[in-house]
Image (cartoon, coloured by chain):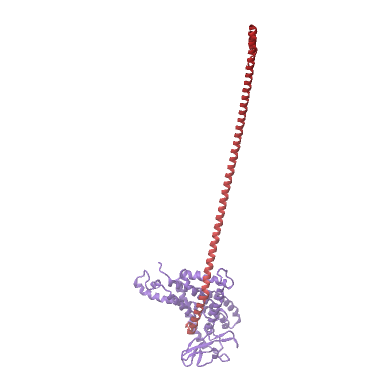
Amino acid sequence: MKKIITVCKQFKVSILAILMVMATSASVFASDTTEGEAFDPGAMITHHIGDDYIWHFFDGHYGTLYLPVILYTDQGLEIFSSSNFYDEHHNQVEYNGYKLEHGYIAALDGSHPLDFSITKNVASLFISAFLLLVVFFVVAKGYKNPKKAPKGIQSFFEPIIIFIRDEIAIPNIGEKQHKRFLPFLLTLFFFIWFNNLLGLMPGGANLTGNISVTFVLACIVLIITLFSTKKYYWQHIFATPGVPWPVMIILIPIELVGILTKPFSLMVRLFANITAGHIIILSLFSLIFIFESMAVAPVSVAFAIFMNFLELFVALLQAYVFTLLSAMYFGSAVEEAHH
Amino acid sequence: MELVTPGIGLIFWQTITFLIVLGLLAAFVWRPITDALRAREGFIADSLDAAENAKKDIAKLKEDNEYLLKEARIERDKILAQANEAAKQIKEAAKEETAKITAKMTADAKAVIVSEKNAALTEVKDLVATLSLDIAEKVLRKSLEDKKAQESLVKELIKDIKVS
């Protein structure tokens, strides 16, 4: 298992490297191209998988939702609509001492305001949170009488809930301890899955493919792991049984780093998998514009449909993997010495 | 690089939103659901157990019934055999009794006949004695008249009258 994880990690690191190259090269291309003439797939893709202050659905007067900008500056909070950054021809303009620079808000006087804006991703996050609450409060209503057979939406989610309990929580954490972690694991699974699916919708935000979101999820997993550790967990790190002390000099730093690499791999895995899926689909559509031919369209669409189905699977798979690995980390934290 | 740089805004909103969703779902959704699932699983397990027990009970009942039936059949056979035996005995006894009675009746009849015969004989003997006395009287009277004639007569009479 550990071997597979390390292989995965290496694979993820390579994806990360490619992404970095792509991101930098995209900006290079952007500066090279003449205004509005040539199609730049790199810029288009980075724009689509990144965050934005507006939510663009379609071209035209009503096609764009301008989201609120919230800045925390030395003078306090500043709240205004992101529509102020655009004139009537959708060109970017300066407003109130701020301007948009490479998709980020920058102060003209060189100060660094903290940006708490309700961006496209934050708006999508709120929608998904609302959706999660609505869906699962409806599901919970079905359990008023526990002896009744599940029906409707309840019968769709119940097997998944039971699967997470019986196949993820109990085998990895243990029959005795799993009840403490089950609410978190269930929330984590459905949060990731719902947001993965929302990200696949046309116009959806790439929320789970955003490093900030996966960073927060991984941090919460790390914090819960560290706060539920038992003696055996630290004993395993600082005094691995049966290992001579000179080896421990090397082993202790490795184990300590291992505490952090586990959530780090969680963070990068989800981010890279979801972002990669989006990049592939966008790249396939870019082919049409690169070749400037409608003849490519059927091929692109066919591949994109295939990729979409694959992404539907990946959406579920990544939610499962993130939850499973979290459960394994919790399990190692609460493990009692038994051998 | 901006793709892999976490932004403070989204981190802030993600933390707050996720924790609120986690709190609400944990309190109002996951707890009732997991409790209800456990309750239902317990209920189903109990029902299955009850069904299994009922099946066992029925099997036991059936076994008991069969045993009872067998027992009853044996009992019936026994009673029948006894009844047969009793009937036979009664028949046998009746036969014996009848035989005894018949034998007794025959014996009684024989005894009566014997006694009657004896009585008749006694009567005859009495008669004979009376007759003999009469004759003797007559003979004695005659002998008083004619000694010689009487004596011959007596001799003749005695010769004639012979008691059987």
Observer able to see residue B119: yes
Image height of A35 relative to B89, above or below: below
Pick the front one: A304 or B101: B101
Look at the image and give the colour of chain B: red
Return the x and y of residue B150 as percentages of the image width and height: 64, 8
Residue B149, x across and y down, in percent: 65, 7
Q: Is residue B159 among what the camera can see?
A: no
Does residue A24 appear to the left or right of A250 in the view shown? right
* A126, above or below A89, in the image: above
Residue A128, x across and y down, in percent: 54, 79
B74 or A167, nearer to the observer: B74
Give the residue displayed 51% in from the left and 85% down from the top. A26
Number of residue marks? 0
In the foreground, A230 or B33: B33
In this view, A89 is above or below A225: below
Q: Residue B130 or A106: which is nearer the viewer?
A: B130
Q: Which colour represents chain A?
A: purple
Q: Residue at x 61, y 33 (%)?
A: B98
Q: Percent from the top left, x then y, of residue A170?
A: 48, 69
Q: Is residue A325 left or right of residue B68?
A: left
Quadrant where the N terminus of chain A lies?
Answer: bottom left
Quadrant holding the C terminus of chain A = bottom left
